[in-house]
Amino acid sequence: MREKFARFMMGRYGVDQFSKFLGIFTIALMVLGLFIHPAIYYLGIAGMIYMYFRMFSKNYTKRRAENDWYLKRTYTIRNWYEKQKRMFKLRKTHKVFKCPTCKQKIKVPKGRGKIEIRCTKCSTKFIKRS
């Protein structure tokens, strides 16, 4: 069965970031539609049909252009989310301070006591507890 599906998908576009977003968004719409209004539910079903249409499409150039459009529009949101994820991982091993002069963020290892920090951008020195 797996080989049959793999043969069926040959030459088809498949799943990309925009398809993943559509899948999550349409499921959320369908769940909301169950509680709020049936029209929202049907909108979710229409989005799901469009998602499958994109996955099984053989028009690579058009699907790629749609995905590029989505990635360009969501760049700032995705970048902010990745930054928050990195900062959350760093919270156990490092402390982040802002330079009082230029507001540059400076990462310092935790547990070093009172240390003098020098900004790499403007060379301002300030003392903080890590």
Image (cartoon, rainbow, N blue to C red):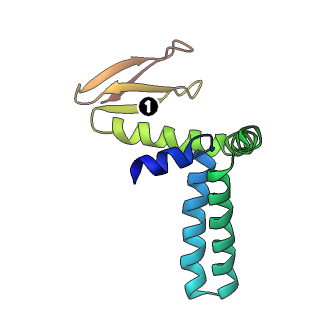
Q: Nearer the viewer, residue 28 or 115?
A: 28
Between 97 and 47, the one nearer to me in the picture:
47
Three-letter residue code for mark 1: Phe
Residue drawn 67% across and 58% down?
A: 53
Image position of 16 (left or right of 74): left
Indicate the position of residue 65 as horizontal and vertical percent values.
75, 40
- Toward which corner of the image does residue 49 lie, by quadrant? bottom right
- Image quarter in which the C terminus is found: top left
Position of residue 31 in the picture relative to residue 39 (left or right): left
On-image quarter of the N terminus: bottom left
- Is label 1 in a helix, a strand or a loop? strand
Judge by depth and name the residue closer to the eye, 119 or 63.
Answer: 63
Q: Against 1, is 129 above or below?
A: above
Q: Position of residue 66 (x, y in %)?
A: 74, 45
Q: Is residue 59 left or right of residue 108?
A: right
Q: In the rendered image of this protein, does residue 70 appear above or below residue 100?
A: below
Q: Quadrant of residue 116?
A: top left
Dot 1 alpha-carbon crowd within 10 angstroms: few under 14, some 14 to 19, many 20 or more:
some
Q: Name the foreground residue: 58 vs 119.
A: 58
Percent position of residue 6, x then y:
48, 45
Q: Residue at x 55, y 70 (%)?
A: 28
Above or below, 82 against 2 in this view is: above
Which residue, given by chain and number where applicable, does mark 1 sit on?
97
- Residue at image x 63%, y 52%? 56
Q: How many marks?
A: 1
